[in-house]
């Protein structure tokens, strides 16, 4: 009985993170107008969360493996709650971005630490338990947009951050009561590597942000400086990682073709299926003229499709394997992106007509079903190759997905800010992402095809 209560607590944490992500997306158009910030700068409110999570996910995953699940999970919950409180009080967009960074330190560690906890509690049905995590996110994504749309319209954008505080307190208290006591241990955590990786990506995104000032004048010297800094820090990161005793990215893993292929796919999946969807409420408001509440409602069918498809897929992974669900889901997501790019404002045939809103709801459902089919298989792929390091593999996977998501938001807001026609800008964004997603298909056939495989690697030896 206790382990089911544990699953409920860690599931509530993932639910909280999912609700938080979707409510911020719904509040995004209001944040832009009320804080009087440019679209490119405001885009950091969305992308900084993923950017910080890039470094914190693998770090906290290793800390969870080495230092114990309970204390790390509780620390992440506390930081997420503090970050939410600071976000609610933020008087301007710069302080809001900084508060979101604090929130991301906690939020980025919730998934890998929760995955490690559930893997230990349900060793005999680990694939199913981890797969069911994919159903929790869309439940939060159903509640979040609708509740967030109402809250933003009625109480202001700050209310979406206040919502996290009581939930965070409940999770913190019950995790203290239910989770197993930590046994602790010693581990070398690669804080330098995490800082260098975040620095390389941050300077790249600063260059893109400066490019976004095209209408008011671009400082090309700053753009060049940020690009040079990004490349320099990236080389320093690669140099450091090959010498660190406990690197944030274990290149021994990436030298193995299944791991490399899986994380190339995760990078593209994060960019095309996760990150850019934060801009869907802005797309609904600016292209289809929907209200804030309606823009939240648009996300609901996507979440329902994800929930139903991921639940079915999770219970069928042993029978279906990993490869074909990932393939079918990827093609379905690409189809959904192509349909969004068409921007159909109604359809009629033989006296039968479909409104633009119904069409948009249908397109979002297609994308959600695709994510629901592919995510459980993609989440489990490669874990069997190294089952003794579940949290580490999960953290690496999340790092690459967040990296793709952060870059896609930065590039998409740059295109939107500098485009003369918002409709054409979204057409370019959705079409490009759909094509990139299809290009990732060869990587799927290199990834493990079935849960019934022998471990490829054991725990790496210490230097």
Image: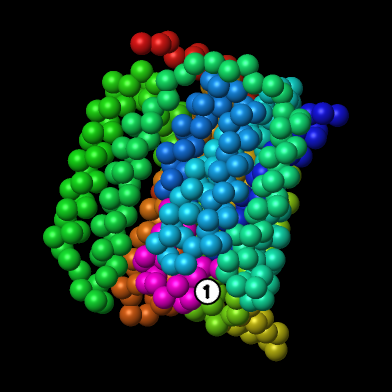
Tell whether position 29 is magenta.
yes
Decide if residue 8 is in sight here: yes
Tell me which secondary structure the magenta stretch mostly adopts: helix
The answer to whether residue 104 is left or right of residue 290 is left
Q: Residue at x 69, y 30 (%)?
A: 118
Q: Nearer the viewer, residue 330 or 122?
A: 122
Q: Where is residue 305 in the image (x, y as percent from the top left)?
A: 68, 57
Q: Residues within 10 Å of mark 1 (few under 14, many from 20)?
A: some
Colour mode of the rendering:
rainbow
Q: Nearer the viewer, residue 96 or 212?
A: 96
Tell whether position 41 is magenta.
yes
Q: Position of residue 448 (x, y in %)?
A: 53, 29
Residue 410 occupies which quadrant of the picture?
A: bottom left
Q: Position of residue 240 (x, y in %)?
A: 28, 27
Which stretch is magenta?
A: 26-48
Q: Which residue is drawn at 23% across and 33% down?
A: 236
Is residue 308 shown above or below 342? above
Q: What residue is pinned by disc 1?
A: 30
Q: In which quarter of the image is the N terminus?
A: top right
The answer to whether residue 437 is left or right of residue 332 is left
């Amino acid at each position: 009985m206790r382990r089911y209560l544990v699953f409920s607590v860690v599931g509530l944490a993932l639910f909280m993170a999912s609700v938080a992500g979707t409510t911020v997306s719904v509040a995004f158009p209001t944040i832009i107008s009320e804080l009087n910030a440019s679209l490119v700068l405001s885009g950091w409110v969305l992308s900084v969360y993923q950017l910080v999570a890039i470094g914190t996910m693998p770090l906290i995953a290793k800390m969870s493996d080495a230092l114990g699940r309970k204390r790390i999970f509780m620390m992440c919950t506390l930081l997420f709650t503090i970050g939410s409180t600071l976000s609610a009080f933020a008087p301007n967009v710069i302080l809001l971005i900084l508060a979101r960074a604090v929130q991301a330190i906690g939020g980025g560690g919730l998934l890998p630490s929760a995955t490690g906890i559930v893997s230990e509690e349900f060793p005999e049905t680990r694939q199913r338990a981890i797969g069911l995590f994919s159903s929790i996110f869309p439940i939060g994504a159903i509640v979040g947009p609708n509740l967030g749309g109402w809250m933003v319209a009625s109480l202001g954008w700050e209310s979406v951050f206040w919502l996290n505080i009581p939930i965070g307190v409940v999770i913190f208290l019950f995790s203290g009561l239910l989770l197993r006591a930590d046994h602790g241990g010693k581990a070398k955590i690669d804080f330098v590597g995490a800082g260098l990786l975040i620095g390389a990506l941050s300077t790249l995104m600063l260059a893109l942000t400066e490019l976004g000032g095209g209408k008011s004048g671009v400082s090309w010297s700053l753009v060049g400086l940020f690009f040079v800094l990004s490349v320099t820090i990236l080389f320093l990161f690669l140099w450091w990682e090959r010498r660190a005793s406990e690197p944030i990215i274990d290149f021994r893993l990436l030298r193995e073709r299944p791991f490399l292929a899986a994380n190339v796919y995760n990078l593209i999946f994060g960019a095309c299926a996760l990150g850019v969807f934060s801009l869907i409420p802005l797309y609904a408001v600016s292209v289809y003229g929907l209200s804030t509440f309606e823009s939240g409602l648009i996300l609901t069918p996507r979440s329902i499709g994800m929930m139903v498809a991921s639940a079915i897929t999770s219970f069928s992974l042993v029978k279906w394997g990993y490869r074909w669900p990932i393939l079918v889901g990827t093609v379905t997501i690409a189809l959904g992106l192509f349909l969004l790019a068409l921007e159909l404002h109604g359809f009629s045939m033989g006296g039968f007509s479909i409104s633009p809103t119904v069409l948009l709801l249908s397109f979002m459902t297609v994308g959600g079903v695709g994510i629901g089919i592919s995510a459980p298989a993609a989440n489990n792929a490669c874990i069997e190759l190294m089952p003794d390091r579940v949290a580490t593999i999960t953290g690496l996977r999340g790092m690459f997905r967040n990296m793709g998501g952060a870059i896609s938001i930065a590039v998409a807001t740059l295109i939107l800010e500098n485009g003369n026609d918002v409709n054409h800008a979204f057409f370019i964004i959705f079409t490009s992402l759909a094509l990139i997603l299809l290009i990732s298909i060869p990587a799927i056939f290199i990834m493990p095809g079935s849960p019934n495989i022998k471990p490829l690697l054991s725990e790496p030896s210490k230097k």
